[in-house]
Amino acid sequence: DSGVTQTPKHLITATGQRVTLRCSPRSGDLSVYWYQQSLDQGLQFLIQYYNGEERAKGNILERFSAQQFPDLHSELNLSSLELGDSALYFCASSATPQGAAGNTIYFGEGSWLTVV
Amino acid sequence: AQKITQTQPGMFVQEKEAVTLDCTYDTSDPSYGLFWYKQPSSGEMIFLIYQGSYDQQNATEGRYSLNFQKARKSANLVISASQLGDSAMYFCAMREGRRANNLFFGTGTRLTVIP
């Protein structure tokens, strides 16, 4: 158990809909990351938050948005869903925002999103 | 160019034998970190081992060791005494630079342990 909690574990929704994925980081971790794993794109970094503020942005679509709340949990909002958005969405956390030695990034179990 | 290359889509190993999973990386930044993760069929991503670019010794974590060859830009994962539960996808990843923290992942290697 990595200590990173994601809900829901599975989600099936229709095209055009909006969903919210939730993540609670490991206790004490201030940095949260979102990754998308799909069959055609592999594992891709979407976005990073540190202590409530956006820290880095990757290949995140404009239809997607995220935020980190004062209690450090994070939500990833996916809107106007398309079939191609079907993927496994991971949340990860680490203690610090920067690349320090030993600053391991721990992943949650992921949220499986299926768009039909 | 790909930042992380895993050239073995699939590997087989006999139970109790050792296996090496290959990973090469590409970066011009002197500061970087290399990670290996295991993804079983259930989908979770499990952290295995970390190697920093300035680490003098190869990282080890139980049955996992990282064969770090900086000049060749390779970071191969060695699993000793393979177990049936080691059957999974294995991903090599890199964090590049001192200020970045996002990871670049390879395409993964599917390891199958044969009884």
Image (spheres, rainbow, N blue to C red):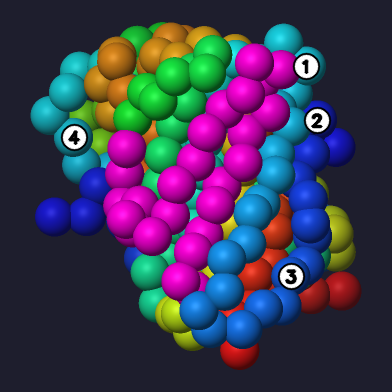
Residue at image point 25% right, 47% down: B3
For mark 3, what is the residue? Answer: A11
Image quadrant occupied by the C terminus of chain A: bottom right
For mark 2, what is the residue? Answer: A3
The span picked out in magenta is: A57-81
Q: Are marks 1 and 2 in contact (CB under 8 Å)?
A: yes
For mark 4, what is the residue? Answer: B27
Residue at image point 62% right, 24% down: A69
Residue type beneath disc 3: Leu
Q: Is residue A15 left or right of residue A71?
A: left
Lower sequence index among marks 1 and 3: 3
Q: Nearer the viewer, mark 4 or mark 3?
A: 3
Describe the element under mark 4 as helix, strand or loop: loop
What chain does mark 4 sit on?
B
Describe the element under mark 2 as helix, strand or loop: loop
Distance of label 4 from label 3 (alpha carbons):
37 Å
For mark 1, what is the residue? Answer: A27
Distance of label 1 from label 2 (alpha carbons):
7 Å
Describe the element under mark 3 as helix, strand or loop: strand
Residue type beneath disc 1: Ser
Q: Are marks 2 and 3 in contact (CB under 8 Å)?
A: no
